[in-house]
Image: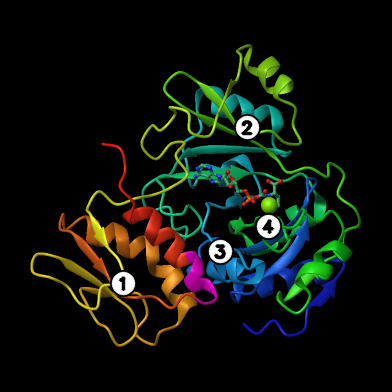
């Protein structure tokens, strides 16, 4: 979709229906949650999710939080039991995101999870967010609605200051009550881990579970496969900026450089971003070294190249 004019919508039923229609058509809509304004896309549509990164001018792909209308809807994407179920029942709707293993055949875009086998889910507590989720009847991926590197917006005016003309619409619901992003909790083999402090105090979570929360530290040893690591990397060695495959390699093409798979024959970076993680998973399954065609380093190409170079970096065995 073109985003040249950003519509300003209000809280009426008709406007929330309009917001859901724009999302269903692959557009971007900023909407208020109780924490901050999110920049939403239908989490099942890869190109729509890719366009979040374009609008934010974000030079890297990190996994995005998937917003759902209810605990039941969250159960479509993950199995909630034990402590996770307890936290969901206690704090949803509310400013808590749970990172949990993804079900098979989940239907979410790989870009939402950044190729990880886990997903961050939350049920927001805001009538506008709920209204749009109910109208869309589907999951909404939404990071904070600010350009990369800027502070999170808590009013529609903040959103427009950063993203006017880059998104299809913003729903103005007044200022956000919490004003801080959601608290993120994951689970390792021993129990709950605080991944990001936020609007729900860690003490409240500890009280609900009657157990201390482990604090995650960057560079710490919590790297249970796919659970808490925030980067997907294939097992196969990777060679980037490859003009063509060498014997024994599989080739991930782009544009005119065709291969076993092609990220985008037409050289469209949004399409390439949407396909990136799926393509890497597919080629990795062939258990051969992966050579990747050069990707232009402009627009979403920067985030694609960032992710490819992380995937290609030497890693601990
Ligand atoms: O309050 C909020 O949480 C706001 C509003 C709009 O809901 N949203 C927000 O989303 O802050 P976002 O996409 O910026 O948060 C993404 C963060 C990632 O940087 C990562 O820390 C964590 O959520 N995350 C999401 N999925 C994950 C996963 N599968 N594994 C590990 N971390 C994940
Ligand atoms: Mg943010």
Q: Is residue 134 above or below residue 210?
A: below
Whether residues under marks 4 and 1 lie with C-beta atoms below 8 angstroms apart, the answer is no
Is 40 situated left or right of 119 in this image?
right
Look at discs 4 and 3 and give the one toward the viewer.
3
- Label 4's element? helix
Instruction: Examine the structure image and report whether residue 257 is included in the region drawn in magenta.
Output: no
What residue is drawn where x is 59% and y is 49%? 65
Is 217 situated left or right of 262 in this image?
right
Is 46 situated left or right of 35 in this image?
left
Of 76 and 52, which appears nearest the observer?
A: 52
How far apart in space, not on screen, are marks 2 and 4 (Cα)? Answer: 18 Å
- Label 3's element? loop
Q: Which residues are magenta?
A: 298-303
Q: Disc number at residue 306?
A: none
Q: Disc number at residue 59?
A: 3
Q: Position of residue 100 (x, y in %)?
A: 49, 37
Whether residues under marks 1 and 3 lie with C-beta atoms below 8 angstroms apart, the answer is no
Mark 4 or 1, nearer chain start: 4
Q: Which residue is mark 2?
A: 88
Q: Disc number at residue 133?
A: 4
How far apart in space, not on screen, are marks 2 and 1 (Cα)? Answer: 44 Å
What residue is drawn where x is 65% and y is 85%? 2
Give the farthest residue toward the top. Answer: 210
Q: Is residue 123 above or below residue 287?
A: above
Quadrant where the C terminus sits is top left
Mark 2 or 1, nearer chain start: 2
């Amino acid at each position: 979709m073109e985003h040249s004019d950003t519509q300003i919508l209000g809280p009426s039923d008709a406007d929330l229906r309009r917001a859901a229609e724009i999302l269903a058509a692959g557009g971007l809509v900023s909407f208020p949650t109780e924490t901050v304004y999110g920049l939403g896309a239908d989490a099942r549509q890869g190109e729509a999710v890719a366009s979040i990164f374009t609008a934010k001018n974000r030079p890297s792909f990190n996994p995005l939080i998937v917003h759902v209308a209810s605990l039941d809807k969250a159960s479509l994407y993950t199995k909630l039991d034990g402590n996770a179920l307890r936290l969901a029942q206690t704090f949803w709707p509310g400013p808590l995101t749970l990172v949990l293993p993804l079900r098979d055949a989940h239907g979410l875009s790989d870009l939402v999870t950044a190729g990880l086998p886990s997903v961050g889910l939350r049920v927001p507590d805001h009538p506008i967010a709920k209204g749009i989720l109910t109208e869309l009847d589907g999951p909404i991926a939404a990071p904070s609605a600010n350009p990369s590197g800027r502070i999170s917006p808590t009013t529609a005016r903040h959103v427009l200051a950063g993203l006017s003309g880059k998104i299809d619409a913003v729903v103005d619901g007044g200022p956000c009550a919490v004003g801080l992003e959601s608290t993120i909790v994951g689970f390792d083999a021993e129990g709950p881990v605080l991944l990001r402090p936020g609007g729900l105090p860690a003490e409240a979570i500890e009280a609900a579970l009657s157990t201390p929360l482990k604090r995650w530290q960057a560079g710490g040893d919590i790297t249970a496969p796919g659970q808490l690591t925030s980067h997907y990397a294939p097992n196969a060695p990777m060679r980037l900026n490859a003009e063509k495959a060498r014997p024994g390699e599989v080739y991930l093409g782009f544009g005119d450089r065709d291969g076993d798979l092609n990220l985008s024959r037409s050289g469209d970076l949004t399409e390439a971003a949407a396909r990136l993680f799926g393509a890497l998973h597919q080629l990795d399954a062939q258990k051969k070294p992966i050579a990747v065609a050069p990707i232009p380093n402009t627009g979403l190409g920067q985030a694609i190249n960032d992710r490819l170079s992380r995937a290609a970096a030497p890693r601990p065995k």
